[in-house]
């Protein structure tokens, strides 16, 4: 947990990246106002998903600004084909694990499918549960159709991160995980509609918005027109920040995606370490005397 004073100027003071990686200097906890400052100062925001305390601590040490406890947990941890089966109890559990890490990074809890679409009241109640589990903000998918819901959540002072474009919870409407915003028009997922969605999310009071799976020129246009930070995934390099799913970033996923980059090959590391352990057990090299009690 940060030791900085409540009056400190947040991550704008000092060299946040150096502080984050050295691990020796206190780093201010990232807050909603700090993110607005980062955008104003044109400093890009980094977000990554995490679902447990171990990885939350590690990515925090790596200097990430926001940890998203994403409903992508359904795919990368639970082995589901999409995020639709994930429920609120599961998200609450994973938010609690990540919050226990006491990170400098802001913790955002994802509202899963079915936990906010029924009514604004349901959305507020679900958001309260994630906040009580330790989130500093919640994220939900949808634009114009979710404006009233976003307004209801922000009215009770729960910060909301929007999410438009390729919204994974719209899997069945989209016919899979498909890039959006390539067609002109006002139908769901079309270019002009996504501009409307972005404005609606901002007007409703969201403090930032994820732009997922849209052409980079559209993401640039939205970023230029909005005053809240945009955080892209599969949306090019003109957003105010970027997000990756942890398993993609670390090379733990089974698949590779055009929009994701593996910054490490942890699959290879895990398989090699396990093979060595299995070999040592089989030939009696493990445990050796140094790891045995006398
Ligand atoms: O659940 C998730 O991981 C997400 C990101 C891809 C933005 O929503």
Image (cartoon, helix red, strand yellow):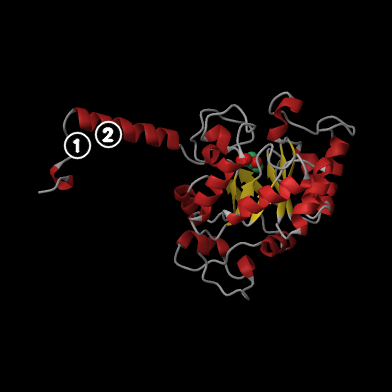
User: Residue at left 59%, top 26%?
Assistant: 81
Q: Which residue is mark 2?
A: 277
Could you tell which of marks 2 and 1 lies nearer the N-terminus? Answer: 2
- Between marks 2 and 1, how big is the CA–CA gap? 8 Å
Q: Position of residue 208 (x, y in %)?
A: 73, 52
User: Residue at left 61%, top 38%?
Assistant: 87
Name the residue at the left extreme: 294
Q: Is mark 1 within 8 Å of ligand 1?
A: no
Q: Is residue 277 above or below residue 7?
A: above
CA neighbours of label 2 inside 10 A, class few (<14), some (14 to 19), many (20+): some
Residue 286 is marked as 1
Residue nearest the observer in this picture, 167 or 80: 80
Query: Relative to 267, is 216 on the left or the right?
Result: right
User: Residue at left 54%, top 66%?
Assistant: 27
Q: Quadrant of residue 243?
A: top right
Q: Position of residue 25 (x, y in %)?
A: 48, 68
| Secondary structure of the residue carrying numbered label 2 | helix
Query: Relative to 212, is 100 on the left or the right?
Result: left
């Amino acid at each position: 947990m940060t030791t900085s004073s409540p009056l400190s100027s947040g991550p704008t003071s000092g060299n946040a990246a150096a502080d984050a990686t050295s691990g020796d200097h206190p780093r201010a906890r990232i807050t909603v106002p700090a993110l607005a400052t980062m955008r104003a100062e044109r400093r890009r925001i980094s977000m990554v998903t995490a679902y447990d305390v171990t990885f939350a601590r590690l990515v925090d040490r790596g200097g990430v600004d926001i940890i998203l406890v994403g409903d992508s947990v359904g795919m990368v941890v639970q082995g589901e084909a999409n995020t639709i089966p994930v429920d609120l109890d599961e998200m609450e559990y994973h938010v609690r694990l990540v919050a226990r890490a006491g990170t400098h990074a802001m913790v955002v809890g994802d509202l899963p499918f079915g936990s906010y679409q029924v009514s604004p009241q349901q959305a507020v109640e679900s958001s309260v549960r994630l906040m009580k589990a330790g989130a500093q903000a919640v994220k939900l998918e949808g634009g114009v159709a979710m404006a009233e819901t976003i307004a209801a959540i922000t009215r009770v002072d729960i910060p909301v991160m929007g999410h438009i474009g390729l919204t994974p919870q719209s899997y069945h409407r989209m016919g899979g995980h498909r890039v959006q915003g390539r067609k002109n028009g006002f139908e769901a997922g079309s270019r002009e509609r996504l501009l409307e969605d972005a404005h609606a999310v901002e007007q409703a009071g969201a403090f930032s918005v994820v732009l997922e799976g849209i052409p980079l020129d559209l993401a640039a246009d939205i970023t230029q027109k909005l005053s809240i930070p945009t955080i892209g995934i599969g949306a090019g390099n003109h957003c105010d920040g970027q997000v990756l799913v942890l398993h993609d970033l670390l090379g733990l996923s089974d698949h590779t995606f055009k929009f994701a980059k593996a910054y490490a090959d942890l699959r290879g590391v895990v398989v090699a370490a396990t093979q060595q352990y299995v070999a040592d057990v089989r030939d009696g090299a493990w445990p050796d005397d140094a790891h045995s009690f006398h």
